[in-house]
Image (tube, rainbow, N blue to C red):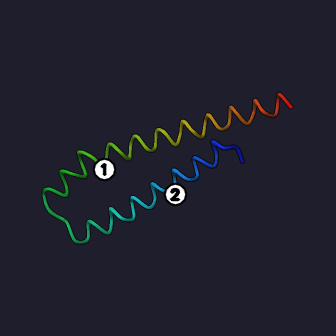
């Protein structure tokens, strides 16, 4: 596993933990402010995190292919 793949795995695990905690938060905090926070912060963060994970996955594939070619 390349270092990028390991970082991707770590990022995914951290994001899943954030989502679990956000869901737990929503069980006790569910009002207009919660919805605004979700729209202003959580949704953009989700989109950015997914974009980063996709980019890291593509980069890991390119690096892996380059490593195979060099060897």
Q: Secondary structure at mark 1?
A: helix
In the image: residue 16, left or right of residue 38: right
Q: Residue at x 24, y 48 (%)?
A: 39
In this rendering, the count of numbered labels is 2
In the image: residue 50, left or right of residue 70: left
Is the C-beta separation of discs 2 and 1 under 8 Å?
Answer: no
Mark-to-mark CA distance, 2 and 1 = 16 Å
Mark 1 neighbour class, 10 Å CA radius: few under 14, some 14 to 19, many 20 or more? some
Residue 70 found in image quarter: top right
Q: What x and y, as percent, mark residue 61?
A: 68, 37
Q: What x and y, as percent, mark residue 44?
A: 32, 42
Q: In the rendered image, which residue does mark 2 sit on?
A: 13
Residue 20 found in image quarter: bottom left
Q: Secondary structure at mark 2?
A: helix
User: Furthest-right residue in view?
Assistant: 71
Q: In the rendered image, which residue does mark 1 sit on?
A: 42
Q: What x and y, as percent, mark residue 48?
A: 40, 40
Of label 2 and label 1, which has the lower sequence position?
A: 2
Does residue 16 lie above or below 69 as drawn? Answer: below
User: Furthest-bottom residue in view?
Assistant: 28
User: Furthest-left residue in view?
Assistant: 32
In the image: residue 20, left or right of residue 37: right
In the image: residue 12, left or right of residue 46: right
Does residue 56 lie above or below 69 as drawn? Answer: below
Q: What x and y, as percent, mark residue 19?
A: 39, 59
Q: Residue at x 51, y 57 (%)?
A: 13
| Residue 19: mark in rendering | none
Mark 2 neighbour class, 10 Å CA radius: few under 14, some 14 to 19, many 20 or more? few
Q: Residue at x 31, y 47 (%)?
A: 43
């Amino acid at each position: 596993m390349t270092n990028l793949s390991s970082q991707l795995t770590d990022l995914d695990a951290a994001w899943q933990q954030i989502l679990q905690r956000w869901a737990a938060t929503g069980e006790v905090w569910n009002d207009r402010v919660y919805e605004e926070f979700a729209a202003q912060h959580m949704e953009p963060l989700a989109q950015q995190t997914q974009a980063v994970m996709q980019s890291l996955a593509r980069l890991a594939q390119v690096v892996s292919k380059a490593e195979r070619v060099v060897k």
